[in-house]
Amino acid sequence: MKVAFWPGCVSKGACPELYVSTHKVADALGLELVELEEAPCTGAGVLSEQNPALADSLNGLTLAMAERQGADLMTICSTCQGVLSGTQFHLANDPARLARVNETLASSGYEYRGTTKVKHLLWILVEDIGLDRLASLVKHKLTGLNVAPFYGCYILRPEEYLGLKERPERSTYLEQIIALIGATPVEYLGKSKCCGFPMLTMNREVSLKMGGKHILEAKSKGADVLVTPCPLCHLNLDGQQPDAAGVMKQPLGVPILHLPQLLGLAFGFAPEDLRLNHHVINTKAALEKVELKV
Amino acid sequence: MKWTIVVGRYDKDQPAGSGYPPPFESAAAKRYQTFEVDLPEHAMVLDALIQVREYQDESLAVRCACRSAICGSCAMWINGHANLACTSKLRDFTVDGKVTVESPPSMPPIRDLVCDMTPFWQKNRQVRPWLEGKEPVPAGEEYRVPNAAMENLIQEVGCISCGACLMDCESFAVNQNFLGPAALAKAYRYTADPRDAETRDRLKTYSEPDGVWDCTHCYECVQQCPKGVAPLEQILKLRRMAVEEGFTNNAGTRHAYAFAESVKDSGRLNELTLMPKSFGLLNIRAQLQSLPAAFNMARAGKLPPLIHKKIPGLARIKSIFAKVGGKFK
Amino acid sequence: MILDHDVVVLGAGLAGMRAALEAARAGVKVAVVSKVHPVRSHSGAAQGGINAAIGKDDSWEIHAFDTIKGSDYLADQDAVEIMASEAPRDIIELEHMGVTFFRDDQGKLGTRAFGGASKARTYFVGDITGQALLYTLYDQILKAGVQIYEEWFATALYTVEGACRGAVCIDMLSGELHLLRAGAIIMASGGCGRVYEPSTNALICTGDGIALAYRVGAPLMDMEMVQYHPTTLKGSGFLMTEAARGEGAYLLNASGERFMQRYAPKMMELASRDVVSRSETIEIAEGRGVDDCVFLDLRHLGPEVVMRKLPQIHEMALDFLGIDMLTTPVPVRPGMHYIMGGIKTDATGATAMPGMYAAGECACVSVHGGNRLGANSLLDTLVFGRRSGAASANYARQVQPLTSGEDFLRSEQVRIAALLERPYEGETHARLRLELGTMMDRNVGVYRDEAGLQAALQTIQQLKQRYQHVAVGDKSRVYNQALTFVLELGYMLDIAETIVYSALTRTESRGAQSRTDFPKRNDAEWLKHVVIHSHDGQAPAIDFSPVSITKWPPQERTY
């Protein structure tokens, strides 16, 4: 299976471990990634709120690039997914908006016709590759590991952008994958809530409390690690976790794994190959629980 | 049909029982009680609660009046999310054979499903929720305004103040001072009213701390609103109006400009410069506060490349900015 | 606690808040008391709009005539003239307060057609007009700084030497009883829809204020005039706004016929409500309905009109019946909707009792007479809310402050405490309420006769006996709704009795009162109001009050 691959800025920036582990897992799955090297940042919702026309055009360009590849567009970031899904939703439902985008794109040599689908790796794993196929690739079951899913807002809301009205089960894919690889999904309220990242520069304390609260709740329910399909959540939950612990005045110490890192472990990749040694929160204790060393 | 409903019971006067699930256990003493009711297939959660209150346990406290999503009384937590009980079908919310309802932990509890809505009303009051009519007020006739301007406001006018948005607001959950989704949506309703004379002053006030920029953009309020008010969308409109009106001396605006600049100049986000630029280069305190995290990340090998790479084909991006970049040109 | 104000308003719907605003403008100390938060009030459920003759081709006289004809000539024409002629200024004032009325092409106020009206004079905000008005007025009383006691439930009125001087209320959150003393009290507590089951009214519409006033001797008028709305949703009984028919929706019977052509060939679906409800009842009784319902058909209006102008009822039919109006007609039936009668007042809102004013659905001026026109109720609340606010402030200024009342508060505390301690003997408020409501719908509904009304009276008397044994199934102080439900049931039993007595008294058919044993209107004998009152818990007494006729002598009424 071939997909147009939009890695997002963060996997090529502060979360290189996501980029690396995505490629590992894709190789194992036989998923051909055609990276859109000339695609721009989605604007992460920041640009669209101040200038919808600008965001429409930037994301329309990315969609058009994928369309030219004749493949679906794959994201590995809940935020990129949400923003691109939102653009796609608006352009599909508002012909005038689509016409404006194509007018802007005309000189760039691209036109968006509305045929490509945008799918997060998480959806491709369950909907295209299938749980059976995934199960057949599991070499190292993570039995005994309690894994708390953390979706990130933009892969869940608003529902109509993300096809959740038609496929409500998309809000359970992480749990399905966690169970599939022999680990135990941890049920907690915070799994669908906000990590606080969008607020980090506006109100740091609030941002850290938001993330810290969910980590604390997951921990109290026995979570050994959190797993997220969103590198922005990862930045706040892992990168800022020591600071969050400070604000919460409570120890946290829960490693945060990217989705392909968790899957990669089950597929038998060495933790170093998935760059699990490059986290702010040390993954050693959690890995030892499933007889892995970093 | 038989339905099972689990109700969070609480009495401010008689605290007893096991308590909320963590991390809210300090909120109140509370117990869960299970009831069985016999109701038709299309019955609502509120029908079940009324059934319980009328025929099984008269001490069950629940606010309700219209039963048809107009009065806004019956917002509560249903299976861990805020919802109106009167339009939530038992069929849709029964999970593992039961529906769980309780007072939302984000609001002070009073009795069973009745929470203290004071925070909600105070926030409403804080945004100056009334028209400050433009002078001169037309004598003996109406203000002339286009119908589209009125229809633009009806999305908020449809708000029934049920509070579902605030109950599940992530920012409010950790910052009680945040004005919150409903109040800010109401703020938009008066700010965008062409008859209002205080647009500029309103935008200035709403741009202050705990205002529009304290929304974390998580879409919980859009998801939970039973009336399609989409408070987040109204907040974003206010942000846009505020920036256009020149209220730009805040992290939110700086963040947006830094973001746009980075995308325009390189096609991608420059994580290294985004944070410092957002804080404001002279905001030493914020810059210092962000240092430990940056240091931790650098030590883990998670620092973005020091030389920010531009994407190939950047001319396309620049051309888009030139055409529709607006204030980000 | 004892709290003093100049004017205390019981009820915070449109009438109450408008009254409070006017009294506050007059410079007196005002408080509003409501058993729910003001914006939960049932005024918010009024969907279609508010009437005023503003347009060039319209005049207040035509509006007044439509109203009087709609009332079946029972409305007091002097009061109707006031309402119709002052309507434009109240609408304009609301617009200035910020109501987002929909506009026409010139940016001026836009109108829609409504039942019983010869011109399109209904001003509207989508299909949430009541809600839009309610919120605007709430915003205005916040701006004016009016004191609000929300979730306070009134248990009794305090009278001193024949004048109304206060009310005892339970603060639901603490369970404490307080006495609010005042120079004047405005009753603005809304209707009593829950006396009937089903009803379009909210569960809170239990006629508290009507009963409280009646208990201290204030006369009630036109209580037999109970309006059945022609289009209430099958099952739940929720309101499907008349605006649907105003926008052009059809009523169909089982064979798909627009049956109104046989009853009101000129106005068709937009004949006045009593006429349409009777027609539907006949269709159903003669076997041309389906499951006791006829159909409201919006399909030909198209999605654009339905989704822009009637989104709320589209959503309700979908939520509660799973029916999409865009593709399928909706089953509807006549359902109890409004009471034209209430506490008898003059055009300033003053009742027969000094110090007591009333406005809105709980009052009877009488501007609706035997049948209220759609979109006149919002207007009634604003015009007479405003007038009673002004008059009560004026009155209260001349009243000496009180020092008494502690004994009365204590006696109420003792009464409520005794009620809470009453042992359980098998009677519950819920069962009695259901029995009362279904009986009223059956015997005192669209069509009535002597036998049915006598049976109703007997049932009510039995229910009153049983009511003495109803226990309160909650012993907590905090938010004790079982207690307020029991008190409400008491109010409703009193009101039901006044409705049935009045209906028995009027031996003719007029407006909402259709006596199958007296099928004709009888102007010679019955061009007068039935007034009912009671003193110190004694049996009700009946009086009559003349109908004011100014310009419009009674005619035959056809649509």
Image (cartoon, helix red, strand yellow):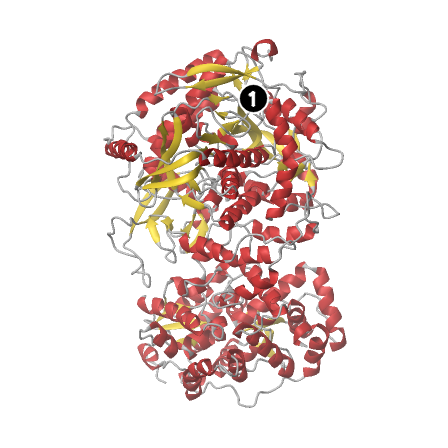
Q: Quadrant of the C terminus of chain C?
A: top right
- For the point 63% across and 23% down, the residue is C68
Residue C51 position by quadrant: top right
Q: Residue at x 49, y 73 (%)?
A: A202
As drawn, B310 above or below B19: below
Of A15 and C432, which appears nearest the observer? C432
Decide: few, some or many residues near mark 1? Use Cα within 10 Å; few <14, some 14-19, many ≥20.
many
Question: Which secondary structure, mark 1?
Answer: loop
Q: Position of residue C556 (x, y in %)?
A: 67, 16
Q: Nearer the viewer, residue C400 or A206?
A: C400
Q: Position of residue B58 (x, y in %)?
A: 31, 38
Per the image, the residue denoted by label 1 is C512
Residue B18 coordinates in the image, percent (x, y): 25, 55
Is residue A105 shown left or right of residue C287?
A: right
Amino acid type at mark 1 = Ala
Judge by depth and name the residue closer to the eye, A8 or B167. Answer: B167
Frontmost residue, C385 versus A47: C385
> Which chain does tag 1 point to?
C
For the question of whether residue A127 can be seen, the reply is no
Residue A277 seen in render? yes
Relative to A228, residue B310 above or below:
below
Q: Is residue C344 above or below residue A4?
A: above
C217 vs B198, left or right, is: left
Quadrant in the picture for the N terminus of chain C = top left
